[in-house]
Image: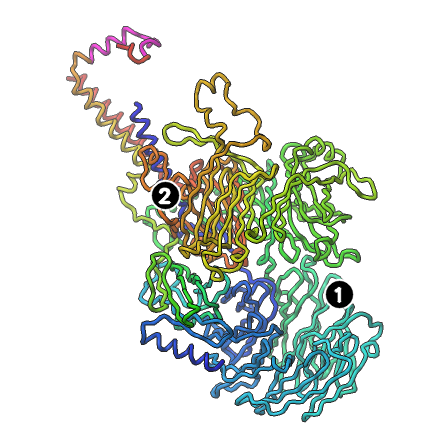
């Protein structure tokens, strides 16, 4: 047992130097050890989400079969995992992580391959970084005249103003003769009859 | 004109669909939603004694939660929810700053930083044989020097370094089949003692070197009577065990390698002993605790042959662990029920006759019996010892008792909700106005002016705070009366402990609670447990003067054929209206869509002999039922046998006594899945109370499709038996998933589809004419969601207007499950990023509003996903008419929009279920999600098109009107003047 622990520890150290996916052919039963790291440095946190601490993140194997937590330095490990193809998900509020496909080879013990399932990017090192930050709230737009005008009420008012100012202009451009004729016609008709309202018959 | 209408319509559509989700602004948090954090029933608790940790207690619970609580208020400092199989076995505190947990049957040891809950290290052990695990943290740990924890699990003893969790040495005991019961290291000694049993009759003592784990001495002695396996260590050289019959105590001394046995019959020690005894796992020196059927005994061990009963406590009672006050003084607490109160006593082990402390505390009778007690001490100003106790009650609540009063209580039963329903609140009576209307118009205007400033982002921070406070204390939402929009309701939940609680949707406060086990416990019903909760009476037409009530169904024991009980509870007061002991068992409860003249809903209960019993047992209900009996069918899903059977009902029962409320079931059909290739994984049906607004769906080109809307659709998903396990256990070639749509009345399979290379876990939701299910695709190694929509083709030729006008359509012809349906099925699949814990669909009052899927993701968040993303008619290239219809171009995966999380920046830890409740306002759905935490909110899947939002600015409207009126006057004056000028000219 001690040997395996050392092996894991040395592998953890090696991972800093060598670009290799972490794999531990551990003597813990028949299983292997998946060890990796979640990296959140260099990411600025958005104002209202508390800055992510490693203590709030979880790493989940195979959709909830096992859950582990991050250590202070961001490292995590799953022990005694059988050979096969597995899925690792990281749950950290405020960040979007792609699930990771982990292949543990049965033929070459300890050979582990990892790839992001969202964009099929192969990871040479099991260092998981968020794909993007997640912002759970809409941000209020600062006050601007445009946004006010774009709102339904603004559009309605705009339309009214348009009508108020454009309609007189339309009548201005019309022939005075024509206006007079139209007015006379209206006077002559008095009450508008149904026939005049039906399309095609009015003229 | 037509053009203008089209423009207007287009504009409206743009307005409606511009935003796919109902996103929230940050200042709207807490207006419509509330979130409560829980931990579950406390299993173990440890009080840190170091200076910095004095004001807190760390606990582990049955919901696999570890948490640090504030001792003064009961708030959570930090909390972690471990995996679902990662049960915490042992906890302890080391070095004053580490919280040590041993979990997963002793295979994982973790150390957490006490102040903030950061995991410091983790180590895993190989467990070959499952056994009880032990954790030993040396008491006199030195800060400077490296110390070792001892962990026994699965046949191995490990020494673990306290600094980084590395395994220093290990020793296997499984070879000798030695099961260790106790491990300890006497102070100032380098020898570790491990004592245990080999088989059932041999006792063994091992002395190991603490440096290397080397066995220094190994002594074994056999005892002819045999051991039952329980043992309690009373001193560093003596152990008390129970014999194989659990009727005699064996004191074992193992001083300097010589093992001596001495047997004492319990009947000699205590009077009227019968049955079996058990040793309580409490740690005392020189004393052990023993539990019999009726009492708890404290027994002092004076020598190998001398046992003396110190105290006897009648049940229900609980004894705490010993608390070391000084080198030679230990204290322990006892909690006992005295009528309605509880009695808390603290005693010192030296002076048992006189207690240090005796307090009587008033305890809510709805909390049941005491389950566990943990004590801690503090030093009073006069240097004497004060004690406080943490008490776990039968309803899973946690209370802190100090100086004779309950300082705080946590309702942690809410961490294990098993079922829920809702109830309307009473109608507001005339003259009794609960609402406080705004004092005067000026204040009302001032408030709205502030809000306007807020929306225009002109407010100063102080003003923003004032606005927020104004919104949150809005008394409207917490009133105890029905509101016009149907937002205010009672959510009635049933917890695993058997407690019924009513929560107000406004702020989540508990209106009333009712504890069932204490209500129904009797000679005949020793372990009552509540199963489900149903709507019993929802008065709206007839019995208006009556309060609504809910039905709680339970059974008297853990087995399926235990007798059932019934309880009808008033939803407004929480008082039990009547209860009934059933003479039969309960396998299934079917609420029927029928009510009797007093609006009591008819329920059918199926017992273990497949007989149906009708409730309520009145003549009236039988008459109503007999009229409808030929239309009532039931089906049962036998997961183990991979079978689905359908039944009809027949009058008459083969009972000894004639019972007109009992009916026989007759098997009509059965579907047997081939057990070598298919195994039932999930089933889903439509919600009974779901409303479908229209059967027709108008698609592009003015064409109509008719939905196949049937209440009897049953969705069944089966997987390959090999692929029934977890992800990673099977290759894509060996896995498949078959989805069936079955008519539950006739057993006809309407549709069947196979997904190769797919496996569970499967989550499915059925609504209207569609099914959405989530599963894992092994080939792509991603999660996938599929949608199946089912349409009725026999109605497809009803498109002709003339047929409709002349009445030659078949739309009004009755729909029967027996007519062979001519159905058409459309389906499509998409990738989805996350694992899913629960899935639900929004429900609205009339079913007009478009639907959203609510997906509980692995991160314990609830995502709202528009149903339009799961539309089988999505296509990569869309025609103009399809675009107008609002179909979204096809993408291979479903989008996850962070603003669409209805839980916004919160997490519903340990999410297990999502419930949707329609509000009276058509656009709005109430969402209640539960797990370890509970969360409530309301959402509008197509925005609130039928009401003004809460932050609608009345002030802006008022200002606009005033401005318009002013403008009218101004222009009028101007035009008057102009006219006058014209006339003068």
Main SS of residues in magenta: helix
Task: Say whether disc 1 or disc 2 marks the residue closer to the N-terminus.
Answer: 2
One can see residue A95 in this view: no
The span picked out in magenta is A179-197
Could you tell me residue A187's position as x and y percent?
27, 8
Any part of residue B536 in sight: yes
Against B315, is B691 above or below? Answer: above
Nearest to the observer: residue B34 or residue B236: B236
Q: Which residue is mark 1?
A: B338
Residue, x 75% and y 65% (percent of image)?
A: B338
The circle on residue B19 is 2
Q: Quadrant of the N terminus of chain B?
A: top left
> Is residue B766 or residue B287 the one in the foreground?
B766
Task: Report whether B306 appears left or right of B170.
Answer: right
The reply to whether the magenta stretch includes residue B970 is no
SS label for mark 2: loop
């Amino acid at each position: 047992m001690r040997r395996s622990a050392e092996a894991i520890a040395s592998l953890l150290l090696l991972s800093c130097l060598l670009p290799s996916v972490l794999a531990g052919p551990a003597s813990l039963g028949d299983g292997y050890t998946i060890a990796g790291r979640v990296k959140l440095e260099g990411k600025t946190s958005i104002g209202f989400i508390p800055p992510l601490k490693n203590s709030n993140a979880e790493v989940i194997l195979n959709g909830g079969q096992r859950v582990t937590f991050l250590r202070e330095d961001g490292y995590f490990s799953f022990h005694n995992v059988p050979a096969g193809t597995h899925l690792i998900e990281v749950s950290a509020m405020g960040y979007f992580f792609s699930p990771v496909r982990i292949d543990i080879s049965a033929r070459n013990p300890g050979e582990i391959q990892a790839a992001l399932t969202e964009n099929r990017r192969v990871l040479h090192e099991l260092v998981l970084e968020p794909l993007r930050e997640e912002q759970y709230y809409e941000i209020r737009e600062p006050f601007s005249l445009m946004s006010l005008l774009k709102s339904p009420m603004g559009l309605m008012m705009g339309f009214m103003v348009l009508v108020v100012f454009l309609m007189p202009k339309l009548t201005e451009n019309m022939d005075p003769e024509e206006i007079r004729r139209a007015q006379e016609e209206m006077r002559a008709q008095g009450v508008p009859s149904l026939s005049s309202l039906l399309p095609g018959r009015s003229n | 004109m037509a053009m203008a209408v089209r423009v207007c319509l287009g504009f409206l559509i743009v307005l409606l669909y511009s935003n796919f989700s109902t996103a929230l602004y940050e200042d709207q948090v807490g207006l419509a939603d509330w979130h409560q954090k829980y931990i579950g029933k406390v299993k173990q608790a440890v009080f840190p004694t170091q200076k910095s940790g004095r004001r807190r207690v760390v606990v582990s619970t049955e919901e696999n939660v570890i948490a640090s609580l504030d001792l003064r208020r009961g708030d959570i400092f930090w909390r972690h929810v471990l995996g679902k199989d990662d049960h915490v076995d042992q906890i302890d505190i080391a070095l004053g700053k580490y919280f040590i947990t041993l979990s997963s049957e002793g295979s994982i040891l973790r150390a957490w930083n006490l102040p903030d809950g950061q995991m410091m290290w983790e180590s895993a052990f190989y467990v070959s044989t499952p056994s009880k695990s032990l954790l030993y943290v040396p008491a006199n740990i030195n800060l400077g020097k490296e110390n070792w924890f001892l962990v026994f699990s699965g046949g191995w003893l490990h020494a673990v370094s306290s600094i980084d969790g590395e395994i220093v040495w290990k020793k296997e005991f499984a070879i000798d089949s030695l099961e260790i019961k106790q491990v300890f290291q006497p102070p100032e000694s380098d020898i570790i003692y491990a004592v245990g049993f080999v088989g059932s009759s041999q006792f063994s003592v091992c002395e190991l070197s603490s440096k290397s784990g080397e066995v220094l001495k190994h002594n074994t002695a056999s005892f002819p009577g045999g051991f039952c396996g329980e043992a309690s260590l009373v001193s560093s050289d003596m152990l008390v065990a129970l014999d194989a019959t659990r009727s005699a105590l064996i004191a074992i001394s193992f001083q300097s390698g010589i093992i001596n046995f001495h047997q004492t019959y319990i009947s000699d020690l205590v009077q009227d002993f019968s049955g079996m005894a058990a040793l309580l796992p409490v740690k005392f020196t020189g004393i052990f605790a023993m539990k019999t059927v009726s009492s708890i005994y404290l027994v002092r061990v004076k020598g190998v042959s001398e046992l003396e009963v110190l105290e006897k406590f009648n049940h229900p009672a609980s004894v705490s662990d010993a608390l070391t006050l000084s080198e030679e003084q230990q204290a322990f607490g006892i909690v006992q029920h005295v009528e309605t109160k509880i009695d808390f006593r603290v005693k010192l082990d030296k002076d048992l006759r006189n207690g240090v402390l005796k307090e009587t505390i008033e305890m809510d009778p709805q909390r049941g019996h005491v389950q566990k007690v943990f004590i801690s001490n503090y030093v009073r100003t006069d240097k004497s010892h004060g004690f406080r106790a943490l008490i776990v009650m039968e309803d899973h609540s946690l209370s802190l008792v100090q100086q004779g009063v309950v300082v705080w209580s946590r309702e942690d039963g809410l961490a294990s909700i098993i079922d829920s329903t809702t109830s309307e609140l009473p109608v507001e009576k005339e003259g009794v106005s609960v609402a406080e209307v705004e004092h005067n118009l000026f204040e009302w205007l001032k408030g709205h002016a502030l809000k306007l400033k807020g929306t225009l982002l002109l407010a100063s921070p102080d003003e923003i705070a004032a606005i927020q406070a104004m919104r949150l204390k809005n008394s409207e939402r917490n009133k105890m009366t029905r509101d016009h929009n149907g937002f205010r309701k009672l959510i009635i939940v049933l917890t695993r402990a058997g407690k019924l609680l009513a929560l107000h949707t406004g702020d989540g406060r508990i209106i009333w609670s009712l504890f069932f086990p204490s209500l129904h416990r009797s000679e005949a019903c020793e372990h009552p447990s509540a199963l489900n909760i149903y709507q019993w009476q929802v008065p709206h037409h007839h019995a208006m003067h009556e309060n609504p009530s809910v039905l709680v169904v339970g059974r008297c024991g853990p087995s399926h054929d235990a007798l059932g009980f019934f309880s009808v509870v008033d939803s407004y007061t929480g008082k039990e209206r009547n209860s009934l002991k059933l003479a039969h068992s309960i396998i299934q409860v079917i609420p029927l869509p029928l009510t009797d003249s007093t609006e009591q809903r008819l329920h059918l209960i199926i017992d273990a002999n497949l007989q149906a019993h009708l409730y309520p047992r009145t003549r009236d209900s039988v008459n109503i039922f007999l009229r409808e009996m030929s239309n009532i069918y039931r089906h049962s899903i036998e997961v183990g046998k991979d079978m689905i059977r359908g039944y009809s009902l027949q009058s008459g029962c083969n009972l000894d006594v004639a019972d007109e409320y009992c009916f026989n079931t007759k098997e009509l059909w059965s579907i047997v899945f081939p057990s070598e290739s298919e195994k039932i994984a999930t089933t889903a049906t439509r919600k009974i109370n779901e409303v479908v607004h229209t059967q027709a769906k108008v698609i592009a080109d003015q064409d109509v499709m008719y939905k196949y809307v049937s209440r009897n659709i049953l969705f069944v998903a089966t997987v390959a038996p090999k692929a029934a396990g977890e992800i990673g256990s099977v290759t894509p070639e060996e896995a498949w998933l078959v989805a069936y749509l079955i008519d539950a009345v006739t057993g006809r399979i309407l549709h069947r589809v196979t997904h190769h290379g797919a496996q569970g876990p499967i989550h499915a939701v059925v609504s209207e004419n569609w099914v959405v299910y989530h599963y894992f695709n092994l080939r792509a190694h991603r999660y996938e969601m599929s949608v199946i929509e089912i349409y009725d083709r026999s109605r497809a030729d009803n498109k002709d207007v003339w047929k409709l006008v002349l009445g030659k359509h078949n739309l009004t012809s009755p729909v029967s499950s027996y007519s062979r349906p001519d159905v058409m099925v459309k389906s499509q699949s998409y990738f989805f990023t996350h694992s899913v814990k629960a899935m639900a669909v929004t429900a609205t009052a009339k079913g007009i509003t478009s639907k959203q899927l609510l997906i509980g993701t692995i991160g314990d968040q609830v995502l709202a996903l528009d149903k339009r993303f799961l539309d089988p008619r999505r296509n990569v290239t869309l025609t103009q008419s399809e675009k107008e219809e609002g179909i979204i171009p096809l993408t291979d995966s479903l989008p996850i929009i962070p603003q669409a999380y209805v839980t916004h920046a919160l997490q519903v830890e340990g999410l297990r279920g999502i419930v949707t409740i329609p509000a009276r306002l058509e656009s709005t759905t109430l969402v209640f999600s539960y797990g370890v935490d509970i969360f409530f909110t309301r959402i509008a899947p197509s925005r609130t098109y039928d009401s003004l939002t809460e932050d609608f600015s009345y002030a802006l409207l008022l200002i606009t009107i005033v401005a318009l009126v002013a403008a009218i006057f101004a222009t009028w004056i101007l035009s008057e003047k102009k006219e006058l000028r014209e006339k003068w000219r």
